[in-house]
Amino acid sequence: MAAKRSRQAVPLDRDSSGRYLPLLVAVMVYLAALAVAGALTMAKLAERWDSGLAGALTVQLPAESADAATLEAVVAALTATPGVRTAEPMDQQAMTALLEPWLGDALLTGDLPLPRLVAVTVDTAEPPDTAALQARLEALAPGILVDDHQRWLARLLDLARAVELMALVVVLLVVLAASIMVAFVTRMGLAAHQRSIELLHLIGAQDAYVARQFQNHALGFGLRGGLLGLVAALPTLYFARLLLQRIDSGLLPELNFLPHEWACFILLPVAAALVTMLTARVTVLRTLARLP
Amino acid sequence: MLRYGNGPEILKRVSLQFDPGSYHFLVGASGAGKSSLLRMMYLAQIPSAGRVALFGRDVAGLSRRETALLRRRIGVVFQDFRLLDHLTARENVALPLRIGAPPGGRSDKARSSDKDVEELLAWVGLADHMDALPPTLSGGQQQRVAIARAVIGRPSLLLADEPTGNLDDRMAVRLLYLFEELNKIGTTVVIATHNESLVQRFPHPVTRLRDGEVEIAGAVAGGRGSAPPAGW
């Protein structure tokens, strides 16, 4: 007695045309996982920069007007300004520590003129008018600079948004490429099994029945390929995380994901499977609809 | 009228009507147009000119869904069998039932259908070959699987194109009696064959085609009646 064979009326599992489809879907999901990781990381980094700098101002006195009396007058003016919570001049030791990585300790021990910085915290609900504050302090110390970091922060946020956008474009391109590939393989399958499909039609099969054969097959391929791609992406992300940890910089992102962010990654194979399934279904239905 | 592409007319001025519940033979030499006529009847071909109506409905302008539903009422025995080589005999016969079943799990109806498939295959002498793949079966055995597939759904119309071509006389007569049994429960049967000696044994109307035209329509060939042979 012969062994029981495939229950599918169209023997798609024997097609050589679809053999590499899971591998290609795996590559697509791998790329999509990296893009999603990049987007999530940049979003978190932007949020960290934003929240870290919100409610903070830096007032910089030029070295030539950074005498103790002027500094005291500036701090007093700042403290009296509505919306300012605290105004703390940075001492020489803190300044030296801040500049040492760039200038070296040898230079800082000399007579290098350094500006004085005042770290200001403001009420985020009712922050002071920075331009008006700048004008008022200018009268006390010509050349004084009130920096609310907005210009710098805006550029960083633009960068973060651009990376997020690029990641989204990568994901969309991956979906598009996967769809084209699946449509191509599906059309090849339709051509290869033309006789079987014609028979199914002649004995009363509707287009949806034929489409189900293809979509179920594509769903399996998409799921297998998607899981493979995700599994391949995990060591890459781990390796990238190790590299970033070695740099140990507050400016660079950390590759740590929260549970709901991991869910995005887990959804990738599911999404890949759904995209392959729907593409196969639509391709079959559209192709069959053109037949007499 | 029917022509393929820009080729010659395969069927010309053919006007036939098969009453519901009737049993017809369609005879004629090879190339007379029997298969083409059947192809139009099982909706594989649309006429170049003229009209085909099935079960009281003009088939022109049917939607794809309506066409599919209409085809489910038609059992077809193809001349070249058209079995799916990767499915067993049992699965081939069950195919029309699977196609008509709603998607999803197996129901009690499906289990009862399995029993019908096994009984039918046993009846056509393939009890020992239910799980055999078509390429491992002889031409006659494949033909019997094709016949079982055509009748499993108890169609309203049975169209058979040379259904006995690969069978010995005894099995041929036996199968024509199976068609008669179906006919008795209301199935309209149209059998295209070139085996006129076989046709002579049944008292049913015979339509003869010649060069794509109807030469004789509905003549009763005679025969010795529809009593089944001994051992039926």
Image (cartoon, coloured by chain):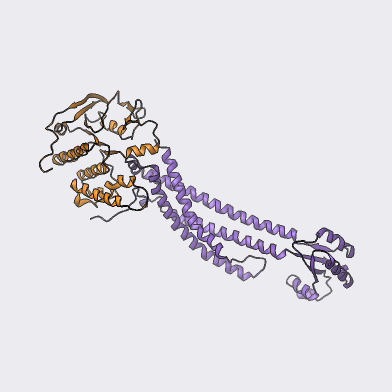
**Who's the residue at 28% across and 55% down the image?**
A4
Side (left or right) of A233 relative to B30: right
Side (left or right) of A263 relative to A130: left
Chain identifier of the purple chain: A
Residue A70 in the image, given as x and y percentages of width and height: 88, 69
Determine which quarter of the picture holds residue A114.
bottom right
**Who's the residue at 66% across and 61% down the image?**
A46
Determine which quarter of the picture holds residue A188.
top left
Q: Colour of chain B?
A: orange
Identify whether A95 is placed above or below B229: below
**Who's the residue at 59% across and 68% down the image?**
A243
Residue A100 in the image, given as x and y percentages of width and height: 75, 73
Q: Is residue A147 visible?
A: yes
Extreme residue toward the left, this view: B230
Identify whether B74 is placed above or below B133: above
Side (left or right) of A233 relative to A49: left
Image quadrant holding the C terminus of chain B, namely: top left
